[in-house]
Amino acid sequence: MKKIAIYGAYGYQGRLVLDELGRRDAEVILVGRDAERLAAVGGGRETRTAGIDHGELVAAFRGVDAVVNCAGPFTPAGTTVVRAAIAAGCHYVDTSGEQLHIKRVHDTCSADARRAGVIVTPAMTDGGVPGDLLARALADHLGGGPLCEVLTGHSATGGGGMSRGSLRSLLGTADVVKSGGLAYEAGEWRADAAPRLADLEFPGLGAVPMARFALPEVVTIPRHVEVEHVQGFVEADLAARFSGAVAEEAVNALPEGPDADARRGQRWAVVVVATTPDGRRATGVAEGFDTYGTTAAVAAEGVLRLDGPAGVRAPSEVLPASFLDDLRGVTWTIS
């Protein structure tokens, strides 16, 4: 039985991951800043107290097989948790969708992870994993050769809004969100790339107006797919809402996150379009319900099934193409 540490275990997303790991009979250790809150959600499981200090985190992670980091916002201090997991000899995944954090982990932590013999895979989420796996499947479907472009879009409808943690992540990366995030253009990362599409077809919705957005898979796809251009998009009205100013006081006054009934009413879809230099095109679609629940299932199943070379790796480098088949309520197609 694998021993998994959840950092940020008493937070909204952390508790959902705890439930999913419990369903998979993993041995779970709860790690966080507040001992009382850890005990309150632990159900008798082992708890270890650690803040963001490197030494405390290394001590808390000693003896576990892997760490799931659910403690956002990730951009300010997420790499501290990554480096502590590496120093403790643990594999690492997180539930971040923050593009700059994901890129920083890939850029700065891979050599240390390789030396330690551990796998580090950020963005084990409802969007980051389907988007990355679909891009890999599309590249293979189109013959495995170089691609001209990969364009990936996200849609979410219904549900009960965002968690406080997600809103704080948006607050902490507001400038990136407003700019549309990074795009991969001819081997370079650019924040000023012109959008390569105006709308995108989603299941049951038809053509939806889109806006460039800082999606996690934009960072991971070029690491395993030979491609000239990669851009991420969300629905234009959703991007506008994300770009609006939200005061910290307003976030604190909101519910911690949507309840179970609201989550069940939410539908999400990821659409990825890949084009070859000679104009051939293929589309991948993944869809399901409950973004937070899906992220929890992705992180729990993913951390237990990591398999690949040591280093910082994209989801497609450590998970099989069939991974999405094993997620309850998720369907996907390539056409």
Image (tube, helix red, strand yellow):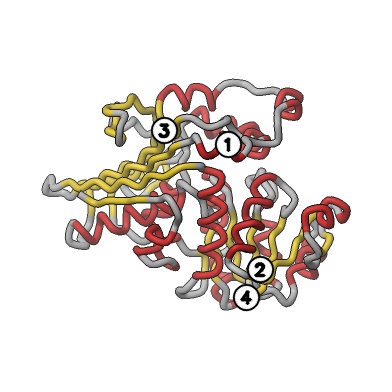
Residue matched to label 1: 261
Nearer the camera: disc 4 or disc 1: 1
| Residue 8 x/y as whole percent | 72, 53
Residue beneath the point at 52% across and 45% down: 99
Q: Name which quarter of the figure residue 320 lies in.
A: bottom left
How many C-alpha atoms fall within 10 Å of the one at disc 2: few (<14), some, or many (≥20)? many
| Camera-side residue of 41 and 192 | 41
| Residue 180 x/y as whole percent | 45, 32
Question: Under tag 2, what secondary structure?
Answer: strand
Residue matched to label 4: 2
Nearer the camera: disc 3 or disc 1: 1
Residue matched to label 2: 4
Q: Are marks 4 and 2 in contact (CB under 8 Å)?
A: yes
Q: CA distance from mark 2 to mark 3?
A: 33 Å
Nearer the camera: disc 3 or disc 4: 4
Residue matched to label 3: 234
Is residue 327 something one can see in this rendering?
yes
Question: Under tag 4, what secondary structure?
Answer: loop
Instruction: Name the outermost residue toward the right.
Output: 36
